[in-house]
Image: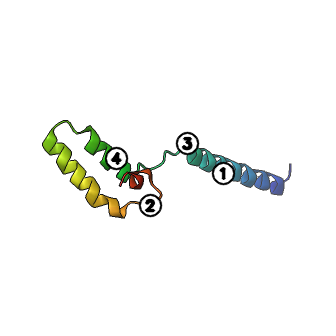
């Protein structure tokens, strides 16, 4: 194999490995948690009445910043 062929083979191999690592990292990436859904879930699961009222108030204050298409916005 010529020097040019070895160089081309190395470049193709490096590009393939980098592309494979990128595709695998994107396919295994977990989505960011929905903070609106988390706030409402915490309000529902709160054990004491005072905590529940505080968390419901917090969830209601955060709700205007939530995306209209999110499931949390449906609960209004």
Q: Position of residue 7 (x, y in %)?
A: 76, 55
Q: CA distance from mark 2 to mark 1?
A: 36 Å
The answer to which of marks 4 and 2 sits earlier in the sequence is: 4
Q: Is residue 15 left or right of residue 67?
A: right
The answer to which of marks 1 and 4 sits earlier in the sequence is: 1
Look at mark 2 in the image and give the residue it sits on: 68
Q: Quadrant of residue 11?
A: bottom right
Q: Position of residue 19 (x, y in %)?
A: 66, 51
- Residue 47 is marked as none
Q: CA distance from mark 3 to mark 1?
A: 14 Å
- Residue 28 is marked as 3
Q: Position of residue 10 (x, y in %)?
A: 73, 51
Identify the residue at the far right of this view: 1
Residue contact between numbered discs 1 and 4, judged by CB atoms under 8 Å: no
Q: CA distance from mark 1 to mark 4?
A: 34 Å
Look at mark 4 in the image and give the residue it sits on: 38
Secondary element at tag 1:
helix
């Amino acid at each position: 194999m010529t020097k040019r062929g070895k160089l081309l083979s190395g470049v193709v191999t490096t590009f393939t490995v980098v592309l494979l690592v990128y595709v695998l990292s994107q396919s295994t990436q977990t989505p960011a948690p929905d903070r609106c859904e988390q706030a409402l879930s915490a309000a529902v699961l709160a054990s004491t009445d005072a905590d529940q009222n505080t968390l419901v108030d917090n969830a209601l204050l955060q709700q205007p910043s939530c995306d209209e298409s999110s499931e949390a916005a449906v609960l209004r």
